[in-house]
Image (cartoon, rainbow, N blue to C red):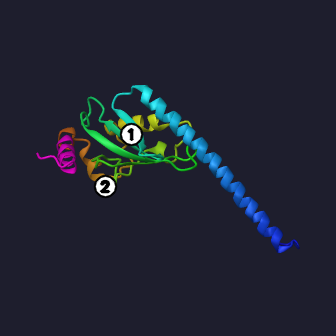
Amino acid sequence: MAQNVPPGTVAASDSNKNNNERAIAGRDSHSVSKRLQHELMTLMISMDKGISAFPDGDNLFKWVGTLTGPASTVYEGLSYRLSLEFPSSYPYAAPTVKFITSCFHPNVDLHGNICLDILKEKWSASYDVRAILLSIQSLLGEPNNDSPLNGHAAELWANQVAYKKHLLEHYKKANGESK
């Protein structure tokens, strides 16, 4: 600081600044909560086939989603759980979305991370939970093999018979089902 200011004044202005930041964060948290409550209601009345999501307990910023594989794809009939974690800056920053159920797919790594542009560089505040789940559901049947996180799945994708065989073995093993 280049100014001659009594030390108590600086501390008071810092304290006021911190109080203002906390008040703004509280308002932001409230607006994010309202947005998430609205998205939950929209999702519940949407009647979209094969997708759902709900807060995980009382925490509105952590959800568990489910989706089923789209019809006429190798994923048809398979059900997956996902975690969705919303930052305090949502919807201006994308949520972190991961598969909880192990998913063998070219755009999903072994830890459940998903390579999907709308969750990264193409994120927009206009997206909502419904759009995210529908996009991931669509991705199951139409992977982007140009940017695979799972090279083995990307290689197998060209042979749908072999892919489905491996997928079902992986799914059963991951879910503790016997062959």
Q: Is residue 176 magenta?
A: yes
- In this image, 81 relative to 22: left or right? left
Classed neighbour count for the residue bearing mark 2: other residues with Cα under 10 Å, few (<14), some (14–19), many (≥20)? few
Residue 46: quadrant of the picture: top left
Q: Nearer the viewer, residue 97 or 88?
A: 88
Residue 160: x and y, percent?
22, 39
Q: Residue at x 65, y 46 (%)?
A: 27
Query: Does residue 22 lie above or below 122 as drawn?
Result: below
Q: Are marks 2 and 1 in contact (CB under 8 Å)?
A: no
Task: Residue under label 1, please give it.
Answer: 136
Q: Is residue 145 visible?
A: no
Query: Does residue 73 lie above or below 31 as drawn?
Result: above
Q: Nearer the viewer, residue 62 or 93?
A: 62
Q: Residue at x 50, y 37 (%)?
A: 128
Q: Amino acid at mark 2?
A: Leu
Q: Quadrant of the N terminus?
A: bottom right
Residue 126: quadrant of the picture: top right
Q: Residue at x 38, y 52 (%)?
A: 113
Give the residues drawn in magenta, as a range: 164-179
For the residues labelled 2 and 1, the Cα–Cα distance comes to 16 Å
Residue 123: x and y, percent?
52, 43
* Mark closer to the chain start, 2 or 1: 2
Q: Is residue 20 magenta?
A: no
Q: Quadrant of the C terminus?
A: top left
Residue 48: x and y, percent?
38, 27
Q: Is residue 36 visible?
A: yes
Q: Secondary structure at mark 1?
A: helix
Task: Residue under label 2, please give it.
Answer: 110
